[in-house]
């Protein structure tokens, strides 16, 4: 079911939850139109699918999965193909339309429920529409990928997770790594002038065309939220731990399969994983 209500939630007069409704085509091409997107999906598939398979085997049933702020929802759609019951949400109707079109192209009758709304309105909608299976009202898996950095108040989403995640469930958080911004500019030499990006604490990207978030959340802050809400981290990975930092493409850089293979190899090794342009954390509630 689709609801077309699409308000933005303001933290103050300047910050609001970001919707990509107006640049959905640009988002699709920029984020997933090349090797960057392939690397991102490869790491997330490796991290998530194995854990989901084990949890489904343990519970002896298909899982109830929520993808909040789903964007194109590739991972959630693939989990639906595997037989799980999936709820997909995004604030952007255009993004949901693209995700629905991709799901329909599979030619399979997938158990997916669709909601267009900010995540803050999702709880009420979930309370009205019951799951399509006999599973618990709560979710075994919650996916939240590249959403924190676009929220006016990212910490508040933890309360939503607390209410929606089942006791034995797992939270998959993928978010932009602000340290990668500094590191990439250091590698590119963007510090030869007195007034550089690295010297601007209040630097703001042009969000009419840029997909660099203006309010990213540091790894240490996310980990502190998880600890405060009594989550136990079970997995940490970096996404694109070297690909974006190589201005000169040579050798293995010219072979996409080799790049993905090396990205997967080093994505969970220290210190390389902390250099990822995005970080992926999977965590369970402490019991």
Image (tube, rainbow, N blue to C red):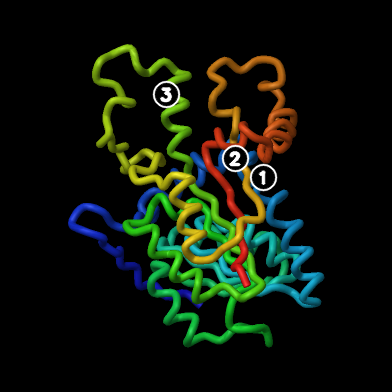
For label 3, the SS is: helix
Q: x%, y% of residue 132?
A: 63, 83
* Circle nearer the N terminus (2, 3): 3
Along the viewing direction, whichever of 118 and 144 lies nearer the viewer? 144
Along the viewing direction, whichever of 220 and 173 lies nearer the viewer? 220
Residue 185, numbered label: 3
Residue occupying the point 41% across, 50% down: 149
* Circle nearer the N terminus (1, 2): 1
Residue 239, numbered label: 2
Cα separation, mark 2 vs mark 3, equals 18 Å
Tag 1 near tag 2, CB within 8 Å? yes
Q: On the rendered structure, is 141 left or right of 262? A: left
Q: On the rendered structure, is 228 left or right of 48? A: left
* Circle nearer the N terminus (3, 1): 1
Q: On the rendered structure, is 232 left or right of 26? A: right
Residue occupying the point 54% across, 28% down: 244
Along the viewing direction, whichever of 260 and 140 lies nearer the viewer? 140
Tag 3 near tag 1, CB within 8 Å? no
């Amino acid at each position: 079911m689709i609801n077309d209500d699409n308000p933005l939630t303001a933290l103050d007069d300047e910050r609001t939850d970001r919707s990509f409704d107006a640049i959905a085509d640009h988002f699709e091409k920029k984020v997933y139109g090349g090797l960057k997107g392939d690397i991102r999906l490869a790491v997330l598939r490796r991290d998530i699918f194995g854990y989901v398979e084990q949890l489904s085997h343990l519970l002896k049933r298909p899982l109830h999965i929520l993808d909040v702020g789903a964007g194109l929802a590739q991972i959630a759609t693939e989990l639906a193909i595997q037989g799980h019951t999936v709820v997909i949400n995004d604030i952007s109707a255009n993004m949901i339309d693209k995700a629905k079109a991709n799901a329909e192209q599979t030619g399979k009758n997938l158990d997916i429920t669709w909601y267009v709304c900010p995540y803050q309105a999702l709880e009420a909608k979930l309370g009205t529409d019951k799951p399509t299976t006999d599973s618990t009202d709560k979710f075994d898996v919650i996916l939240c990928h590249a959403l924190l950095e676009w929220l006016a108040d990212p910490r508040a989403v933890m309360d939503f997770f607390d209410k929606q995640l089942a006791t034995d469930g797992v939270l998959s958080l993928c978010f932009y790594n602000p340290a990668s911004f500094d590191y990439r500019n250091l590698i590119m030499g963007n510090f030869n002038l007195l007034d550089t990006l690295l010297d601007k604490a209040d630097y703001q990207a042009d969000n009419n065309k840029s997909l660099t978030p203006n309010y990213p959340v540091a790894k240490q802050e996310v980990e502190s939220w998880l600890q405060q809400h009594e989550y136990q981290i079970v997995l940490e990975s970096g996404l694109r731990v070297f690909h974006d930092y190589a201005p000169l493409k040579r050798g293995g850089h010219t072979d996409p399969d080799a790049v993905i293979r090396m990205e997967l190899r080093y994505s969970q090794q220290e210190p390389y994983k902390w250099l990822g342009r995005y970080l992926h954390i999977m965590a369970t509630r402490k019991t």
